[in-house]
């Protein structure tokens, strides 16, 4: 894969800070200004490492994302030996939360320092320091959970993000995207994003939305700006149209 851009947006999601305190997510927030200085352009792996090293992590909730806790409690996630990937896992809170029910979870992040901290937090998850776009796991996964990883990537990298999702999922696998959908950003990350942006890169690869809903447990100031979509990876030649499930493209 040509691109090596990796976003550490999953350590709690854009819109939250220490102890779950909400932060403004535009240029009026000095942390966002500094983030954008460090993560400059699509080749951003080193920039995300510097963010962790310098403590510029306005996305880090310091605990599992409420939507992840709700998903686990719903009983609708694959269990009994299912394999799960959490790309851009950051501090690993969501990966640990997903590791119950007999699931085998891998937390992936480009920053070695934060992976080392995550390993100290739990031995139930395999935390791996690697680039999402070049990492080669031994086998594909049953489930991938993506929280705001997409909106943290330069838009030019989104097709590569989708291609990797297709490569890393089993033929019958599921992708869950917790989507942050800002519309008024003058730059990024986070970048302006709509549901249609996801569909434009995922539908051609055989992904269809099985369900989509507002994230009713979003942390401020993300309330009203997040949706949870569950995508099924269809077999080659299967119908991939989503016209019968119209999206609310914020």
Image (cartoon, rainbow, N blue to C red):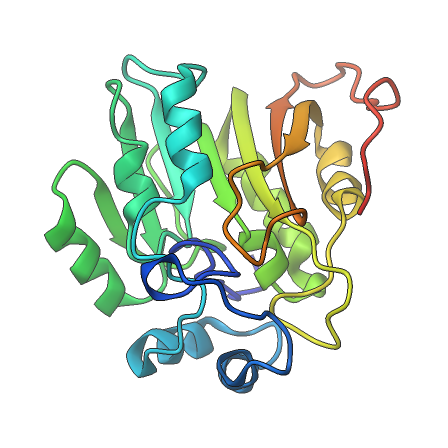
- The quadrant holding residue 241 is top right
Residue at image point 58% right, 35% down: 166
Q: How many marks?
A: 0
Q: Is residue 235 visible?
A: yes
Q: State the image coordinates of residue 29 (x, y, percent, origin top left).
A: 56, 80
Residue at image point 77% right, 61% down: 183
Residue at image point 33% right, 15% down: 79
| Figure quadrant of the N terminus | bottom right
Q: Toward the viewer: 61 or 45? A: 61
Q: Is residue 141 visible?
A: no
Q: State the image coordinates of residue 176 (x, y, percent, origin top left).
A: 54, 33
As drawn, 83 above or below 57: above
Q: State the image coordinates of residue 112 (x, y, percent, origin top left).
A: 25, 66
| Residue 150 left/right relative to 70 | right
Residue at image point 88% right, 23% down: 243
- The quadrant holding residue 97 is top left
Q: Toward the viewer: 129 or 91? A: 91
As drawn, 113 above or below 72: below
As drawn, 170 above or below 250: above
Q: State the image coordinates of residue 167 (x, y, percent, origin top left).
A: 54, 37
Q: Toward the viewer: 53 or 130? A: 53
């Amino acid at each position: 894969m040509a691109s090596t851009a990796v976003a550490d947006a999953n350590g709690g999601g854009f819109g939250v800070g220490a102890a779950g305190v909400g932060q403004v997510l535009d240029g009026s927030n000095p942390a966002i200004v500094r983030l954008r200085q460090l993560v400059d352009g699509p080749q951003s792996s080193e920039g995300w490492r510097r963010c962790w090293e310098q403590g510029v992590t306005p996305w880090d909730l310091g605990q599992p994302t409420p939507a992840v806790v709700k998903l686990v409690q719903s009983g609708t996630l694959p269990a009994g030996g299912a394999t799960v990937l959490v790309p851009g896992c950051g501090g690993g809170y969501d990966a640990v939360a997903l590791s119950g029910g007999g699931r085998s979870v891998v937390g992936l992040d480009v920053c070695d320092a934060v992976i080392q901290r995550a390993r100290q937090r739990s031995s139930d998850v395999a935390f791996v320091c690697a680039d999402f776009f070049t990492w080669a796991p031994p086998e594909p996964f049953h489930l991938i959970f993506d929280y705001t990883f997409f909106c943290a990537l330069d838009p030019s990298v989104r097709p590569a993000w989708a291609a990797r999702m297709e490569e890393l999922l089993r033929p019958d696998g599921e992708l869950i995207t917790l989507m942050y959908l800002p519309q008024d950003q003058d730059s990024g990350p986070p970048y302006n994003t709509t549901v249609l942006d996801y569909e434009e890169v995922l539908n051609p690869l055989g992904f269809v939305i099985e369900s989509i809903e507002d994230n009713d447990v979003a942390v401020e100031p993300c309330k009203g700006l997040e949706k949870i979509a569950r995508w099924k990876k269809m077999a080659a030649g299967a119908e991939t149209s989503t016209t019968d499930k119209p999206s609310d493209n914020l």
